[in-house]
Amino acid sequence: MINIFQNEKDSKNALIKNKIVEFFIHNGNSTNTDLSKELNLSIPTVSKLINDMIEEGFVLEYGKQETSEGRKPILYGLNPDSGHFIGVDMGQDCIHMGQMNFRGELVNLLMDIPFCYANTMESLDELCHHINKFIDSLDIPRKKILNVNLNIPGRVNSGTGYSYSYYNVSEEPLTAILTNKIGIHTNIDNDTRAMAYGEYMQGCVKGEKDIIFINMSWGLGMGIILDGHLYTGKSGYAGEIGHMPYFDNEIICHCGKKGCLETETSGRAFYRKVKEHIEAGETSILSQDGQTDFTVEDLINATNREDPLCLEVLEQIGLNLGKALAGIINIFNPDLVVIGGILSQTGNFLMHSIETSVLKYSLNLVNKDTHIVQSKLKERAGVIGACMLARKFVIDQQ
């Protein structure tokens, strides 16, 4: 277990210091008076704790607050160099990695490192090699890195440290294997949940507390935030919207079931449908460009160039998702629905069909308070969320 206040003899003081850290995270630099009101403690008590945290290296003075009259109070905030966090996000065929300081500022970002995943120990060794290489390239000592978080698609139990979709290669928890191979405490979480948390902390969320995040990538996932807290379900598997039995299409999903929502509403479905139309002789920018094969990125580019075939297929995908999303909105009545993942990069072409279908199928009294928006962080949502979860894990251990 990690404890940033491990030398604190008084567990009550450690708990209060943890609350001070959380206050700074959510409110930025503040005065002792602000902290006193928030924590319901006397100003002398808060001042002593802040002085302790300055000595421990977690808090810095940030000058004086500008006021129109009277004595100017001192502003305090987190010391960005008091600790760093590494986030690793598994893409379809690549890795994204980032370094974040204690204040939540992204210091380094390395995107799209080619990588072919396999459920083997050899593949896991190669992944850890990439992570260690990234850490060794940073201009901070390893002891400054407090935690690493790895995002993994599919079913991940972050509490027990087991992944059941990727790297289920040992009876030992994956977190223990990673920690041993990287040499820094490492935890894991679901990739969509990390994206949702990244968007909540640094993206398009502006004070909303109940959020649904839809990850439209090669697969289809959902992250849930209720009353400002990530919802994981009993075993960490909440949010598997892609595997709702939704179609009578006899298409076998990669999960082994038939008719999952993901079989008609995902990057995988987009690719399959466009390819079937082209093979049937329909014209497209993709076929005119002389491509015999293409990627999801090629599909996105063709769509944004207003390719009629891609637009037609994407519209139906959006309508399908909107109908399913209408049911989710009826159940959760969220403040905000965020559409993310690579397919969201088609912008209004996708958003319009989703919104049209949601309006058609959801209850008016329920959906009128729900806003549907595009991800602000886009392709960085996962790696930023991973870094944020690494920090969250450390703070939650206090």
Image (cartoon, grey):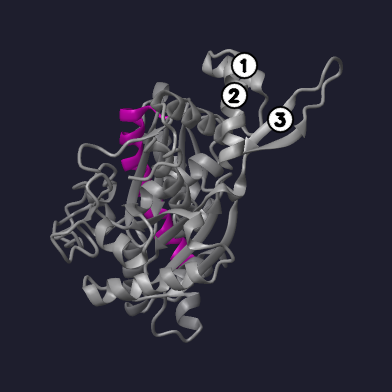
Q: Are marks 2 and 1 in contact (CB under 8 Å)?
A: yes
Q: Quadrant of the C terminus?
A: top left
Q: Amino acid at mark 1?
A: Pro
Along the polypeptide, which appears first: circle 3 or circle 1?
1
Q: Is residue 353 visible?
A: no
Secondary element at image label 1: helix
Q: Amino acid at mark 3?
A: Leu
Task: Give the alpha-carbon distance from disc 2 to disc 1, as whole Å.
Answer: 6 Å
Q: Which sits in the foreground, 283 or 340?
A: 340
Q: Is residue 215 visible?
A: yes
Asked if residue 264 is among those painted magenta in the image, a careful observer would answer no
Along the polypeptide, which appears first: circle 2 or circle 3?
2
Residue 361 % position (x, y): 35, 34
Give the mark toward the camera: 3 or 1: 1
Which SS does the magenta portion mostly show? helix
Residue 145 % position (x, y): 48, 56
Residue that carries the numbered disc 2 in the rendered image: 48
Residue that carries the numbered disc 1 in the rendered image: 44
Residue 82 % position (x, y): 56, 47
Q: Residue at x 60, y 50 (%)?
A: 81
Residue that carries the numbered disc 3 in the rendered image: 75
Vertical comparison of 16 with 213: above or below = above
Secondary element at image label 3: strand
Q: Residue at x 42, y 49 (%)?
A: 390
Q: Which sits in the foreground, 3 or 290?
A: 3
Vertical comparison of 171 with 206: above or below = below
Task: Give the alpha-carbon distance from disc 2 to disc 3, as whole Å.
Answer: 15 Å
